[in-house]
Amino acid sequence: MRAVILGSILTLFVLTPAFGQMTGSGGVNMMSGEILAPAAGRGEGAGGSFWRTDLWLKGTAGSTVTLEFHANDSASDSPTATAPVVLTSAVMFFPDVLNSPLGLEHAFGNIVIRGTQPVSATIRAYTPSGNGAYGSAFMAMPTSMAMRGTGGPMHDDARYQLYVTGLQPEPRARVNAMVTNAGAVPITGTLEVIDADGQPPVGGTASLPFSLRAYSSHQFGDVLAGMTSRYGDGSSMQLRVRLGDGSNGMMMVLASVIDNATNDTYTVMGSMMNGGAGLIP
């Protein structure tokens, strides 16, 4: 993984009947027995940067939480490292969590967090710069929020496609996209660059396949390179991510948009609606 994606994260989910716990007021309780913190990293990145990751856990004091790290592009369903921790207070802070307690000197991937009681987490990935630091913080999400496959034919079914908008094209920006397997079953699929009308942009069709083991991710770098939109300045181009036929696992999508002049990044939020089909019932 190119660590530059850690500078800004988009998280795009499709709601399922298992979407967290509904509260009495109609809201969603984001605490869960299994949550996933994507895009954690420790190591060198672009432009001489060095990334590290901090983690905050919130849960029931005295309960046990297991941290399970899965590397990007892993060849195995087994975690790279695990670490059980006991919450000595309702909120605990773990600076440089990949180094301690996970014991990793150099790694990029996802942290799956499982608790004996429901837990929530915030992750911060950043790099020191002079007297300060730059990076991004975001909430770990219940794996139950991920889009689920059926194990049957899905490729042309809009309910099993995620759309990412809010992008900026080359040369003023670059877009990195990350697909994450949010479950224990391997998944396959494709990431496509499409124009505002759903057709291929000028410059050809970009269709990028992925195959992911349990809880692993793959990053596609600079996915809009060489693409030109037929509409406006190109800001209307989008990404479509499809689960492959036969996949019965779970998928999340992350992306970052980086300004090529300043390296500033921003977070974009994808629509939960899928090609007019609406939310998965």
Image (cartoon, rainbow, N blue to C red):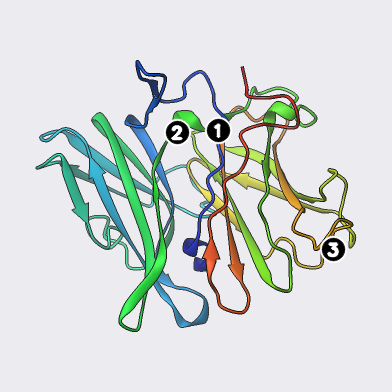
Q: Are marks 3 and 2 in contact (CB under 8 Å)?
A: no
Badge 3 crowding class, 10 Å Cα cut-off, few under 14, some 14 to 19, many 20 or more, is: many
- Dot 3 corresponds to which residue? 228
- In this rendering, the count of numbered labels is 3
What residue is drawn where x is 31% and y is 43%? Answer: 121
The x and y percentages for residue 139 are 39, 45
Of tags 3 and 2, which is closer to the observer? 3
252 vs 201: above or below: above
Q: CA distance from mark 1 to mark 3?
A: 32 Å
User: Which quadrant, please, contains the C terminus?
Assistant: top right
- Pick the front one: 262 or 245: 262
* First in sequence: mark 1 vs mark 2: 2
- Dot 2 corresponds to which residue? 143
- Dot 1 corresponds to which residue? 250
The reply to whether residue 220 is in sight is no
Q: What's under tag 3, amino acid-wise?
A: Thr
Q: Are marks 1 and 2 in contact (CB under 8 Å)?
A: yes
Q: Is residue 171 left or right of residue 24?
A: right
Q: What's under tag 2, amino acid-wise?
A: Thr
